[in-house]
Amino acid sequence: MKNRFKDDLTIILKGYAIGSSMSVPGVSGGTMAILLGIYDRLISSISNFFKDIKTNIIFLMKFCIGAGLGIGSLAFLIKWLLEKFPLPVSMFFLGAVIGGIPALYKKTKESAFRFSSIVFFLLGFLIVLCIGFIPADSINISSGSGILHYLMILVTGIVIALALVLPGISTSHMLLVLGMYDDMLTAITEFDIVYIGILGIATLIGVFLITKPIEWTLNTFPQKTYWMIIGFVLGSTTEIFRDIILPSVPQTAEAFWWISFGIMSIAAFILGFVAIKALSRFED
């Protein structure tokens, strides 16, 4: 009974951490799930949903409760902190990302570096790097009306699913690239049930379509897949540097600023590193 309660609490807490971190540029839900050691179980639960419906529903409900609480509470605090203290907050999440790399390396089960490992790492790193440099509204599928418009919403849902499931890919950035970010916010604030419903169903379909191939690659090519995931995760840190850290550094900063914010940033980085290491111990 005690172990079951501990397992339930761990799932909810990990969901909470994933949900709250999704508002941070460069930190995707998939990345946090990987770092917290719950990614494999999430993929398996969705991919094999109909094999054990009751168990999978219970697990996903626990996770969604935690993620929902994180999005609904801590996400707003993180957004406020990012506005007021962008450098220390971004350094905290940077420390969290770096702190999870040793756990990911263990999953490769590699005793020595191989050339193929470097290739797959660089491939993952470059994919996320290239996606991060795609300009906002470069595709813009939000225009139009009628059936075509709703078909585009379906396509958007599948793209959102891809960004949600694959680590290192920012969902908010993908929405900006597709020109759907503002439309989605408007639909939420105006309670456009039709728009939100179609987008939600499309995202759900996309998640179910994507998880099966991901589970297959994790089981068939675990070493290569995890090296690519490490590339995804480290590649996502470039967005944190580009969009938060560098813009938050004043062009004419005084010595006091460098000392005070330098100390806070180092402390935040260490705190993020230690926090993710502590949570990563509770592997599912």
Image (cartoon, rainbow, N blue to C red):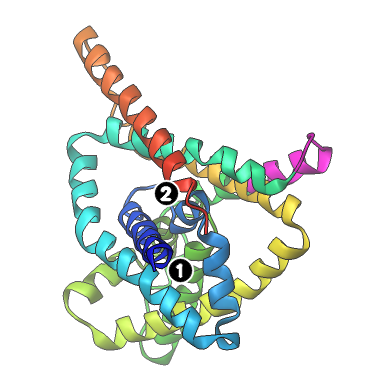
Q: Which secondary structure type mostly characterizes the magenta part of the structure?
A: helix
Q: Residue furthest front?
A: 1
**Circle 1 SS class:** helix
Residue 275 horizontal side relative to residue 226, left or right: left
Q: Which residue shows up at 65% across the image and 67% down it?
A: 214
**Residue 152 x, y percent position in the rendering:** 45, 80
Label 1 Cα neighbours within 10 Å, binned few <14 / some 14-19 / many ≥20: many
**From mark 1 to mark 2, how far is it between C-alphas?**
15 Å
Of pointers 1 and 2, the one earlier in the residue sequence: 2
> In this picture, is 114 found above or below 267?
below
Dot 1 corresponds to which residue? 160
Work out which quarter of the rendered image holds the N terminus and state it.
bottom left
Q: Examine the structure image and report whether residue 71 is included in the region drawn in magenta.
A: no
Between 225 and 49, the one nearer to me in the picture: 49
Q: Nearer the viewer, residue 128 or 113?
A: 113
Q: Position of residue 245 (x, y in %)?
A: 35, 31
- Closer to the camera, 175 or 145? 175
**Residue 1, labelled with which disc?**
none
Image location of residue 202, percent across then percent down = 45, 82
Q: Looking at the picture, how far across and down is residue 71, in whole percent?
A: 27, 61
Give the residue furthest to the bottom: 147
Identity, as a three-letter code, of the amino acid under mark 1: Ile
Residue appearing at x 60%, y 80% in the figure:
48
The boundaries of the magenta stretch are 110-126
Q: Is residue 242 visible?
A: no
Looking at the image, can residue 118 be seen?
Answer: yes
Residue at the image point whose x is 24% and y is 47% from the top:
78
The residue tagged 2 is 27
Is the Cβ of the residue at disc 1 closer than 8 Å to that at disc 2?
no
Residue positioned 49% across, 79% down in the render: 56
Q: Which amino acid is tagged 2?
A: Val
